[in-house]
Amino acid sequence: MGDFFGRLKNKILGNKKPERRGVQINEANTAPLTEEQIREISGIPPRIEPHQLIVGSGHHVGRQRENNEDSLFALSSTLSVNSKKLPFGIYIVADGMGGHKNGELASEMAIRAMSSYLLSKLTDPLFGTNPHPPEDSLQELMRQGVNNAHDLITKNAPGGGSTLTAVLIMDSQMTIAHVGDSRAYAVYLDGRIQSLTRDHSLVKRLEELGQINAEEAAIHPQKSMLYRALGVGEPSEPDIFTATLPDPGYLLVCSDGLWGVIPETEIFSIITSAPSPQRACQNLIDAANAAGGPDNIAAVLVRMSE
């Protein structure tokens, strides 16, 4: 330990001894370094208290579309009282379809219906003056939110439809609801990037049945054709499940305008090399546009603070 502090001192002083121009210098009076200084010099990221969700987002029309049918929602909060800490967040990406205004309106309705329902059911139980568990389970709340989104699209955007990938984070637990082919990824710092969601597309189903391989699926002309979406036909049964937030690591929620254009290995490299989630999202948008930007792009990136 003495060696470590000696190296830190040498780094600060540049390995130079103070000059003694007839003045006696008492080196023993050197002030000890603070923990913050030690972490900065040694390259350790500063500790953030309380733990909180650090978030970035990116949204772009792309280079080949005139209107943007992608929508996103990102809300983060932290409750820290006494010894209790509650990082909380709602993150949603929706990709509309139906052409022109129908697709734009469908994705907007999906985002608004899902976020407003979750907030109406969770704000008072979690943050009110008399905190208590929600009346329904988190998975049931997510299911009802998806149903509300489907109904709102059906009424307000006839002929339109939308994907929906929504993530509710409480502390380190994620509850995910998913319909369509937007995706949620877990990005781990050990080199792994894992899709948490399953695409509800005809081509993905063919791949799952072994009729085509992943390479064929990636270039299939009908790869964007969905068999499950909000606002289309009967209410869609969402995939709903619970997982643990990658820590250390990231949660990425994005539309196919990103994952369908940029390989997962490149997505991983962009995210892990960026100085912040916000910068990472902008770099992901830039990369998708540099690859031609054939579709709208939406991305939300979340990590837990150190």
Image (cartoon, rainbow, N blue to C red):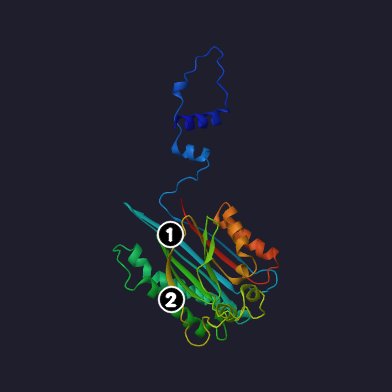
Mark linked to residue 77: 1
When asked about the image quadrant of residue 205, the answer is bottom right
- With 297 as the anchor, is 248 left or right in this view? left
Q: For the residue labelled by badge 2, is the local secondary structure a helix, a strand or a loop?
A: helix
Amino acid tagged 1? Ser
Mark linked to residue 204: none
In the image, residue 139 above or below residue 40: below
Q: For the residue labelled by badge 1, is the local secondary structure a helix, a strand or a loop?
A: strand
Q: Name the residue tied to disc 2.
A: 145
Give coordinates of residue 47: x percent, y percent. Answer: 45, 46
- With 22 as the anchor, is 65 left or right in this view? right
In the image, residue 104 above or below residue 285: below
Q: CA distance from mark 2 to mark 1?
A: 20 Å
Amino acid tagged 2? Gly
For this rendering, which residue is in front, 38 or 146?
38
Q: Earlier in the sequence, mark 2 or mark 1?
A: 1
